[in-house]
Image: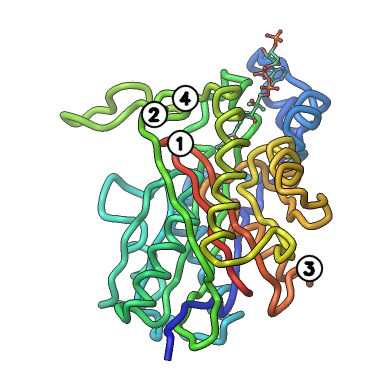
C-alpha cells in the first residue's frame, strides 16, 4: 500500500498586541517617520499586524499554535515523532527553537530541528516532513512556522517596518493510505542573497554586521511574481493535475498585489485565494500556516479540497506544495 502524508489538524496563534495601520503610523510619527494608512493599504493590502511582547519568543508562539493543531487533529503531544520549526527569528543562536518547543510541549526523544528558508520556510518544512513520513522515518509530525519579525525590523526604515508582523501556524502531518500531499517543488538561487537579508551575526561575544532586515522591495516583488507561477505549474504537472483542480490558493502573505498577480497568471479568480495579509501583515514562515488555519476554521477550506500552498522569500527561495486536505 502506498504511504502518503496528510494534514490531520491545523492551529495558529497571534500575540494579543494588534496594531492597525493608524496605530503604527502614530507610533512612527513620534520618531519623525512619515507614512500613512493610504500608502500601506494601496501598496500592500496590509491593514493590521500583531507584535509579540519583549518577553515572548518564537517558541512561545509556536507552542500555542502547536497545541491548537494537536487539539484539532485529536493527537496527543506524546504521539508526535518529528518536530520541524520553520523560522528566521529563533529564540537563540542555538539550540533550535524546535528543541525548546519540544520541551515546552512536555515531550522528549523525537527528532526536532529548525528549518531556515525565510518566507518559504513552511513549504520547505512541509516538503521535508512529507518525505520523512513517506520513507517511514516519522508517523506524526508537527510542522510549524513561527516568527517574531518585530525583533529584526528597523523602525527608522518606513519601506520595511510597516510590512511585517509576528505569529505562528502549525499542522499535524500524519502517515495515511489516502493522499494528502500530492506533489512538492522547491527551489533556491543564492545569487539574490542581498535583496532580502539580515546581514548580521554574532562573533567574539558581540553582534557583528547589521542585525536588522534589509529589502529591495521592487527586486523581490519582480522575482516573486515569476517564480510563484512557475512553482505552481511545476507542482501541478508533477501531480498530473491542472489549475482547474485547485479549490484554494494559499500563497505567502506578503503583498496583496503579488497574490493578485499570481492568481491572474494562473487564471484563478481572487475568490479562490485565501487572504490574511490584511490582518496579519507579512509573518514570513508563519504566514501560510496562519492563512491555512484561518481558512479551515472559517469553514472555507473543507475536507477533500485541493490546496496549493506557495512560499517565496529571502535566499532567494521559493516553492509550492499541492495537497488534498
Ligand atoms: O516576504 C518576502 C517577500 N517580500 C515581498 O514579497 C515584498 C515585495 N515587495 C513589495 O511588496 C513592494 O515592493 C513594497 C510594498 C515593499 C514597496 O512597494 P512599491 O510599490 O514597490 O513601492 P516603492 O518601493 O517603489 O516606493 C514608492 C514610493 C517611494 O517614494 P518615491 O521615491 O516614489 O518618492 C518610497 O519612498 O513610496 C515611498 N514609500 C513610502 N511612503 C509612505 C516607501 N515606503 C513608504 C511608506 N510610507 N511606508
- Name the quadrant of the N terminus: bottom left
Mark 3 and mark 1: span between their CA atoms?
A: 30 Å
Q: Is mark 2 on a helix, strand or loop?
A: helix
Q: Is mark 4 on a helix, strand or loop?
A: helix
**Residue 244 placed where, x, y %?**
74, 62
Q: What element carries label 1?
A: loop
Q: Earlier in the sequence, mark 3 or mark 2?
A: 2
Q: Which residue is drawn at 54% across and 53% down?
A: 234
Mark 1 and mark 4: span between their CA atoms?
A: 8 Å
- Name the quadrant of the C terminus: bottom right
Q: What element carries label 3?
A: loop
Mark 2 and mark 4: span between their CA atoms?
A: 6 Å
Q: Earlier in the sequence, mark 3 or mark 1?
A: 3
Q: Which of marks 1 and 2 is nearer the N terminus?
A: 2
Task: Report the residue that reaches farthest toward the bottom.
Answer: 1
Residue 181 sits above or below residue 315 on the image: below
> Does 225 sit left or right of 142 as displayed?
right
**Residue 55 placed where, x, y %?**
47, 48
Label 4, residues with CA under 10 Å away: few <14, some 14-19, many ≥20: some
Find disc 2 in the rendering and name its residue.
193
User: Mark 1 near ligand 1 (CB under 8 Å)?
Assistant: yes
State the image quarter where residue 14 is shown.
bottom right
Find disc 3 in the rendering and name its residue.
300
- In the picture, the disc for residue 195 is 4
Ligand 1 shown in quarter: top right
Q: Residue at x 75, y 33 (%)?
A: 23
Q: Are marks 1 and 2 in contact (CB under 8 Å)?
A: yes
Q: Do the residues labelled 2 and 4 touch (CB within 8 Å)?
A: yes
Residue 39 sits above or below residue 182 on the image: above
Amino acid at each position: 500500500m502506498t504511504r502518503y502524508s496528510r494534514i490531520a489538524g491545523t492551529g495558529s496563534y497571534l500575540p494579543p498586541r494588534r496594531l492597525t495601520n493608524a496605530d503604527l503610523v502614530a507610533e512612527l510619527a513620534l520618531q519623525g517617520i512619515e507614512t500613512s494608512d493610504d500608502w500601506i493599504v494601496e501598496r500592500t493590502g496590509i491593514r493590521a499586524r500583531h507584535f509579540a511582547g519583549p518577553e515572548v519568543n518564537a517558541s512561545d508562539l509556536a507552542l500555542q499554535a502547536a497545541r491548537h493543531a494537536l487539539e484539532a487533529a485529536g493527537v496527543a503531544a506524546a504521539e508526535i515523532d518529528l518536530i520541524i520549526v520553520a523560522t528566521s527569528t529563533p529564540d537563540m543562536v542555538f539550540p533550535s527553537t524546535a528543541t525548546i518547543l519540544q520541551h515546552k510541549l512536555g515531550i522528549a526523544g523525537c527528532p526536532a530541528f529548525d528549518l531556515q528558508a525565510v518566507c518559504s520556510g513552511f513549504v520547505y518544512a512541509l516538503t521535508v516532513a512529507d518525505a520523512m513520513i513517506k520513507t517511514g522515518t516519522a508517523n506524526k509530525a508537527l510542522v510549524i512556522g513561527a516568527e517574531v519579525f518585530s525583533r529584526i525590523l528597523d523602525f527608522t526604515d518606513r519601506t520595511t517596518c510597516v510590512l511585517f508582523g509576528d505569529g505562528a501556524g502549525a499542522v499535524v502531518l500524519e502517515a495515511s493510505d489516502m493522499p494528502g500531499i500530492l506533489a512538492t517543488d522547491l527551489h533556491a538561487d543564492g545569487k539574490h542573497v542581498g535583496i532580502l537579508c539580515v546581514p548580521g551575526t554574532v562573533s567574539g561575544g558581540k553582534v557583528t554586521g547589521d542585525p536588522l532586515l534589509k529589502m529591495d522591495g521592487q527586486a523581490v516583488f519582480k522575482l516573486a511574481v515569476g517564480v510563484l507561477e512557475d512553482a505552481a505549474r511545476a507542482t501541478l504537472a508533477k501531480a498530473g493535475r491542472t489549475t482547474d483542480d485547485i479549490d484554494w490558493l494559499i500563497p505567502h502573505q506578503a503583498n496583496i498585489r503579488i497574490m493578485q498577480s499570481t492568481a491572474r497568471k494562473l487564471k484563478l479568480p481572487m475568490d479562490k485565494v485565501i487572504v490574511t495579509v490584511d490582518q496579519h501583515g507579512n509573518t514570513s514562515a508563519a504566514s501560510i500556516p496562519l492563512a491555512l488555519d484561518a481558512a479551515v476554521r472559517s469553514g472555507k477550506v473543507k475536507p477533500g479540497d485541493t490546496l496549493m500552498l506557495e512560499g517565496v522569500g529571502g535566499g532567494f527561495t521559493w516553492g509550492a506544495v499541492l495537497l488534498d486536505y
